[in-house]
Structures are given as C-alpha cells and as structure tokens.
Image: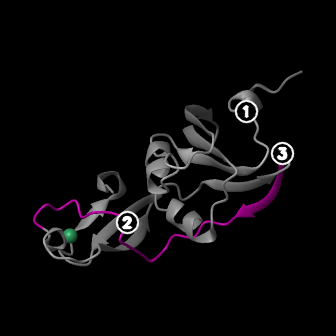
Amino acid sequence: MINKSQLQVEAINHGTVIDHIPAGQGIKILQLFGLIKNKERITVGLNLPSVALGSKDIIKVENTWLSAEQANQLALFAPDATVNLIEDFEVGEKLQLQLPEQVEGVFSCPNSNCISHNEQVSSKFKVRAVKRQVRFRCNYCEKSFHQDFMTF
Ligand SMILES: [Zn+2]
C-alpha cells in the first residue's frame, strides 16, 4: 500500500525540505532566499492538503542547506514551518524556527512616502507576531504593516 501523502512531492537525496508553509507563502519564501537563482533542482508543492493548516505549501531544494539565520527569516512568513535537512534520504537535522526581533535590509517599506526610499539607508523593521500573523514596524516612518504587504 503506497501512502498517497508521501507522494505529493518526491523525496530528495541531499538538501532541505521546508514543510507546513501556510498556502500562498511558498513563492515569497523562494524569493526571500533567492532560491530560484541558484541552479539546484527545486520541487515546489502549492496548496497541498494539510490537516493542521487546511492547505499548505512545501519546498524541497536539493544540495542546499538553510542556515539557522535563514530559518529565522523563514519564520517571518511561516512561523510553524518545519525545516528538515536531508542527507542520504534521511532527516539529518531539524532546524528550530525563531522569529527575529528585527529585519534589516531585506524588505522595502510599503509606505511610498517613507524616507527610507530617498535616503541611502537600509530598511529596518521591528518584528512581532500577533495571532500567527507577523507584523512589521518600520524604523523610519514608524508605520506597521501586515506580512502580506511586505515586498523585497
Ligand atoms: Zn517606512
């Protein structure tokens, strides 16, 4: 008997599996880490059925290991994601996600009047989680934004 849920995305030999990403966030995560730019094979599953989330995205990147810092950035979009580092088809290590207190130089401020767009400064946001959603407060204009409005 073959387990159907295991066949949703095929297994990888070496690399990183990011699972339990809320549906719709998978594409953002690919952008965040510039994963598409590297030449490794990436398997992406979008809107897969999930008992816990309703639907979820999953990303498998071959021959690439996320760092602890990247895992924390991942928490910005997928606080409950699981990150498994795979070696020889087995889970070698599970990375724990910790929401960072602030992010610098990753996003641009959604407020088009923000001075961060005119000055030569790197963007800076304070991060906090509110009921499984992440909010970003800009250090320059002090406005607060929902995760869905953040762009790179
Ligand atoms: Zn701003």
| Quadrant of picture, ligand 1 | bottom left
Q: Earlier in the sequence, mark 1 or mark 2?
A: 1
Residue 81 higher or lower than 136, as above or below:
above
| Residue 100 location (% of width, % of height) | 49, 74
Res 89 label? 3
- Horizontal side, residue 83 vs residue 135: left or right: right
Q: Residues within 10 Å of mark 2 (few under 14, many from 20)?
A: some
Query: In the rendering, which numbered label is found on residue 83?
Result: none
State yes or no: residue 93 in magenta. yes
Mark 3 CB near ligand 1 (8 Å cut):
no
**Which residues, given as a range, are shown in magenta?**
90-113
Residue appearing at x 74%, y 56% in the figure? 85
Q: Main secondary structure of the magenta part?
A: loop
Disc 3 marks a residue whose amino acid type is Phe
Q: Amino acid at mark 2?
A: Val
The residue carrying mark 2 is 106
Identify residue type, mark 1.
Glu
Label 1 sits on residue: 10
Query: Helix or strand or loop: what does disc 2 sit on?
Result: loop
